[in-house]
Image (spheres, grey):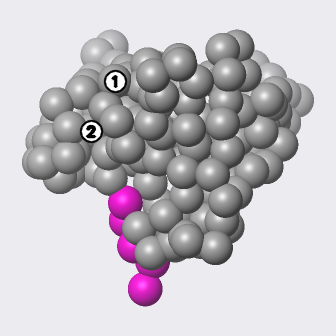
Amino acid sequence: MVGLTQPTIGKLESGEQAGTTNLDKIARVLQTTAAYLRGDIDDSAEDAFIPPTPAEIATEMGLVRVNEIDLDIGMGASFLDESHVTEVERWVPQEWVAALTSTAAPLLTFARPFGDSMYPTINDRDIILIDRSERRVNRQEAVWALSYSGMGMIKRVRVEPDGTHRLMADNPQVRDATAADGELFVIGRVVGVVRRM
């Protein structure tokens, strides 16, 4: 964590080396002081700067953590392989999230879909906020993040009287598709769009 080799740390511990710079680096990581590490003082917290945790900073600033998932999800269709999902932690204002949904932040996910089948509602690589607590299509013609036969997509969904799901694009040039039982997995409902400029 401090970028020192084990032999260097061993020399510091044995007293062979007395590098103040290295002790300062170690003290910062351990949230104490070089004086404590040298044995000059008995209290590890005396004169030590203990930085606040990210959670403490977020609470003070009114932020909540929402992960952004790179799912390579398409607004047309793209292969969805959850084994290659990468997550990036984002801190966003709690008030902004509350304006979009009452769902708790751990059940929300940002994603950046690509393609133009949902244009003009969602543009290529806009940022969308997905509410993963909604895993069943219960709002007709809402916008959903889906896996359809292993393909990730963003579509409007209408449940038909026969139980099939009609997958609709907002772009009039893209044809609708129909998903039967077992072909559709709901990732969550799209509750927000952040437009790229």
Tell me which residue sits at (17%, 52%) in the image. 96
Residue 16 lies in what quarter of the image? Answer: top right
User: Is the residue 75 above or below the residue 161 in the image?
Assistant: below
Tell me which residue sits at (66%, 14%) in the image. 181
* For residue 50, side relative to residue 16 (left or right): left
Answer yes or no: is residue 104 visible.
Answer: yes
| Of the pair 90 and 142, the residue shown nearer to us | 142
Tell me which residue sits at (66%, 36%) in the image. 178
Of mark 2 and mark 1, the one earlier in the sequence is 2
Q: Tag 1, which secondary structure?
A: loop
Count the marks: how many?
A: 2
- Percent of width and height locating residue 105: 31, 31
Residue 137 lies in what quarter of the image? Answer: top left
**Which residue type does callout 2 highlight?**
Val
Residue lying furthest bottom in this view?
Answer: 197
* For residue 197, side relative to residue 176 (left or right): left
- Percent of width and height locating residue 56: 22, 33
**Which residue type does callout 1 highlight?**
Asn
The residue range painted magenta reads 193-197
Q: Main secondary structure of the magenta part?
A: loop
* Residue that numbered label 1 is attached to: 138
* For residue 72, side relative to residue 138 (left or right): right
- Percent of width and height locating residue 149: 79, 29
* Residue that numbered label 2 is attached to: 64
